[in-house]
Amino acid sequence: MEQQTPWTAKLTAKLRRESFVLLVALAIAFIAVTAGMNGWGVLGLLAIMLLAIMCSSEPRPQVASAPPVSEVEEPAARSLLPEVSATLSALDIPVMVLAGDASVLFQNRAAEKAFGEVVIGAHISARLRSPGILDMVRETIVTNAPNQIEHSERLPSERVYIVRSSPVELGAVGGANHGASERLFVLSFRDISEVRRIDRMRSDFVANASHELRTPLASLRGFIETIQGPAKSDFKAQERFLGIMFDQTTRMSRLVDDLLSLSRLELKSHIAPDEKVDLVPLLGHVRDALLPLANDVGVDIQLHLPEGRAEVAGDRDELVQVFENLIENACKYGQEGKLVEVFLKNGPGGPVEVTIVDKGPGIPAEHVPRLTERFYRVNIEDSRSKKGTGLGLAIVKHILTRHRARLIVKSEVGKGTSFTVRF
């Protein structure tokens, strides 16, 4: 087969490429000749068209336009950040996305709620000051390996988290020419507060119950042995012993109830109540409920209430428990003064305060800081004789912690004591 010359090959390639145009030209020429036009003129036009095809330049290959400088310089990982952020926003656990310099690129709503809003681009230490978390983040950035620690937050309530930092590769930086990738880091917080509270509650309950129940149980055992032995035929002694045994079992029942109440309060101490409670009728209800006790010990309860409403955010039943406990203590331990006064302050622009004042013997200064500890008693015998469990003020403290309120105690020996609840 005869080999084509370069010029012939080039002509053949051009004719193939422009075959559609040639076919259209031939069709037009045929129509022109049929219509009566000069045949030589039509041939001349076809020759000119063929020459134009031969002289036409080669089509230039399209060159991709260079991307803008900002696109070249922007890491692909950050270009994917909006999609990642949209996914992390749906999570109910706190999550932050950090850059390689530990600056915050994103935080979801759960993180904002738990730790407050962080300025995007700020270093993680601007919000989280824990040395353990900061060291863990630095180690993850250096080693590119995941790490986790246990971290506790004290305010506004005690929370315990498993904090985990892990690297994430999201893509190449700037394309193939750069050959590197930017690493982002995800910092997540898993709340294990409830697990820790349940563990502590279980151990505390066993320790406290075993300690406080030991004495009444020993008493009961001794009385039962006496009734079965030496007092077997002494009906007067049996009647007296049975009365003491009844008091001891009642005390144990109150103790168990208080321990369970304290445990339930600890489980929900981090959840602030959001209902509105008017303290004016609530204090009236508490005073009416305690009138029989006050009459028995010879104490007069006087309320000093403002006109109108005095509303606070709270749980009504729990607030009733707080003020019943404080006013009952004032009646029992301040009965020598014969008067308990309750003041409700609701000034404009100021906090709502309830102050319970007694005219009793007062509390020595060294005991005041420890009054809200479990089973702490200024006078053990006096407390037990008045049927106290040693848990009342501990319950008050936990309820007020949940209500984000404060308990302020002032006392002077020989002049009385005041307990102020400030909301």
Image (tube, rainbow, N blue to C red):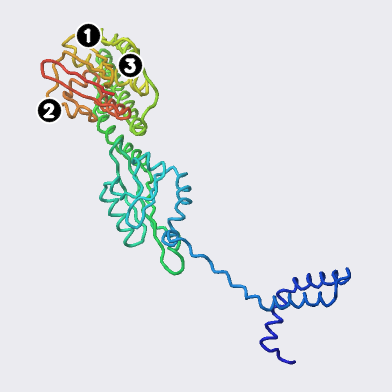
Which residue sits at x=27%, y=36%?
207
In this figure, which residue is indicated by the disc labeled 1?
Answer: 299
Amino acid tagged 1? Val
Say if mark 3 contacts mark 2, CB within 8 Å: no
Q: Secondary structure at mark 1?
A: loop
Crowding around mark 1 (Cα neighbors within 10 Å: few <14, some 14 to 19, many 20+) is: many
Sequence-first disc among 1 and 2:
1
In this figure, which residue is indicated by the disc labeled 3?
Answer: 310
Which residue sits at x=78%, y=71%?
25
Snapshot quadrant of residue 17: bottom right
Sequence-first disc among 1 and 3:
1
Label 1 to label 3: alpha-carbon separation: 26 Å
169 lies above or below 367: below
Q: Position of residue 108 (x, y in %)?
A: 41, 44
Amino acid tagged 3? Ala
Horizontal placement of 33 versus 71: left or right? Answer: right
User: Nearer the viewer's eye, disc 3 or disc 2?
Assistant: 3
Snapshot quadrant of residue 102: bottom left
**How many numbered markers are drawn?**
3
Q: Position of residue 395 (x, y in %)?
A: 29, 27
Crowding around mark 2 (Cα neighbors within 10 Å: few <14, some 14 to 19, many 20+) is: few
Sequence-first disc among 3 and 2:
3
Q: Secondary structure at mark 2?
A: helix
Which residue sits at x=33%, y=41%?
115
Quadrant of the snapshot with the N terminus: bottom right
In this figure, which residue is indicated by the disc labeled 2?
Answer: 366
